[in-house]
Image (spheres, helix red, strand yellow):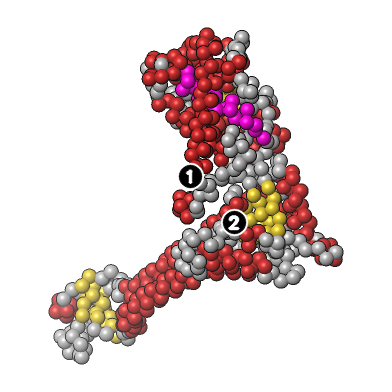
Amino acid sequence: MDKKKLKRPVPQKPNGKKNNVRTILFVLFIAGFLFLGLSSYGKSEDLQSVAFSDVIRRANNGEISKIEVVGDELKITKSGEEEPSQTSRKESGSSIYEQGLENRDVEVKITPENTSGEVWSNVLFTLAPVILLGGLLFWMMRSAQGQGNQAMSFGRSKARLYGNEKDKVTFKDIAGSNEAKDDLEEIVDFLKSPKKYEANGARIPKGMLLVGPPGTGKTMLARAVAGEADVPFFSISGSEFVEMFVGVGASRVRDLFSKAKKNAPCIIFVDEIDAVGRRRGSGMGGGHDEREQTLNQILVEMDGFEQGVNVIVLAATNRADVLDPALLRPGRFDRRVNIGLPDRKDREAILKVHYEKKPLEKNVNLDALAAKTAGSSGADLANIANESAIIAAKHSRKTITQDDVTAAFEKVAIGPERKSKIMNDKEKELTAYHEAGHAIVGHVLPDSDDVHKVTIIPRGGTGGVTWFIPPEDKSYHSIVEYKDILARMLGGRIAEEVIYGSDRVTTGAGNDLQKAAELAREMVTNQGMGKKLRNQVFHSDEGMMMDRMMHERQYSDETAKVIDDEVEALISEAAERARTVIKANLKKLEELKDALLEKETVEDVEVKKIFEGTSMPKAAALY
């Protein structure tokens, strides 16, 4: 099939500019009329005005050689002069001779009076009020018409049309996501050669749902499909369908699909479709609220495509679990493309893409950075690259160094350093013991991650940081891994307790305790990792508060009590294991504490050197 040549849509000027042009033209029009009126009264010559009786006296005495009569106006030329220098007026209805001129030697010239200026001035000042009033009424009517057009445009789609850009996005511009790109290749091939599929009786999916965490490149992949297929691309957000007026969302859906059919073959991309595609019948907003009407219209439009209309709908969401089942049935969103977080190889490729146009020094190790950024999305990696460029520019460097990249990574991952926060010696010592407790428990326990850095410099919202990074990407976690993570989370609080006593613990462990409680409850309720409730899942609704209130809990009060007991048991076990490890390695705890007080930040190599000779007590082992 021949590719259609797309015409770039001509951007329309905002209404404000049009109104400004109309206003300027109107003002110029009125100014022109005023200028004509004033010019009709202008004097062609600058003459001195004198009394008529004085003119007659001097004319009879021979002091005036010529008098030009224009109507009742007299232009006086003195004896010895060639041009008139004075002016006067006679009485109407009689000649100058009848009014006293006796000297016949004075040249009297009668010039017919030109009344055109007076006529135009009369016409002008007669029509000026009419013109002004008419212009005012015209301006008011145009303003009202513009507001009426704006009101009528509520039902029009706000989708933005792409397809003729010079910098089109293609699959080559997107690093990683190879499986997702393979799935989307079918859509591209269909848009390029639909007859090949139709000849075999194949039906290409009308809709494809892109599902993945935020920042994984769902929107970019959708634009790459349009770029590869070289077809128009209508982009709109799910929230742009819904307005305060009832029925506007459905009207916009109809308008969007109507435009798409006229531009077929093309792609409609709906970002964050969960804004309008949530499950119906939840009791929220009634059965006929605006969102549900919009969803109903989307369902009708997707299932009502005529045969042979090559329009494909791509939608993106990170909450596929809340979508209405009718939206996901065959005939609508037939396919589901899962776009997960990138693995190490993909992260390195993504970093190379983002650093391609940045002045990067040759010794910067992007592979090591990719290894440390496990769990990061493409947007996170782009943020790291941008932050490193900002840090280099801040220090007036023309190239990005390894230190800039490391500082950017730490700033994005654990927050910026807050060196302005001043702690006294006692608080520094307590923070050093706290962070050393996290580090030593995490180092000793066999299924914990490696210690990457320990610092007592406040970062983000914390007083200090003990940073653990897994040696490799993990897809699954075992019970023993989670238990070791729980123990190291409580290592800071337990270190305070061992050193200062149980009554001297501080609020510095508040965030640690909260995360530990969340992980323990996740293990029991969602992962089936409890002792008494092993292999049983008690999922709790994590939606909005009203959603949780509307849905009844799916287990009894007795089971809820057992869940609480299981969570308490996991926390108590983790605390006891952390206590056992710290007491068995108090000397190493003190060494790391001293190093932190001296240097404030201890890197992974030095941490491992300090922890050489640590022991794993039998009481801390899991059986």
Q: Which image quarter is the C terminus in?
A: top right
Furthest residue in direction front, as rendered: 558
| Residue 306, x across and y down, in percent | 71, 71
Residue at the spot x=52%, y=59% of the render?
282
- Residue positioned 23% across, 75% down in the render: 87
The image's mark for residue 557 is 1
Is residue 249 something one can see in this rendering? no
Q: Which residue is rendered at x = 62% and y = 59% of the image?
A: 325
| Camera-side residue of 585 and 474 | 585
Q: Is residue 199 above or below residue 113?
A: above
Query: What residue did someone put label 2 on?
Result: 323
The picture places residue 333, in percent across and down from the top left corner, at 67, 59
Q: What amino acid does circle 2 point to?
A: Leu
Q: What is the C-alpha distance between the residues marked 2 and 1? A: 30 Å
Q: Residue at x 75, y 51 (%)?
A: 183
Q: Earlier in the sequence, mark 2 or mark 1?
A: 2
How dense is the environment of label 1, judged by Cα within 10 Å: few (below 14), some, or many (20 and up)?
Answer: few
Q: Nearer the viewer, mark 2 or mark 1?
A: 1
Check disc 2 and report its element: helix, strand or loop: loop
- Whole-percent x, y for residue 575 in the image: 51, 23
Q: Magenta stretch? A: 476-496
Horizontal side of 100 relative to 286 (left or right) equals: left
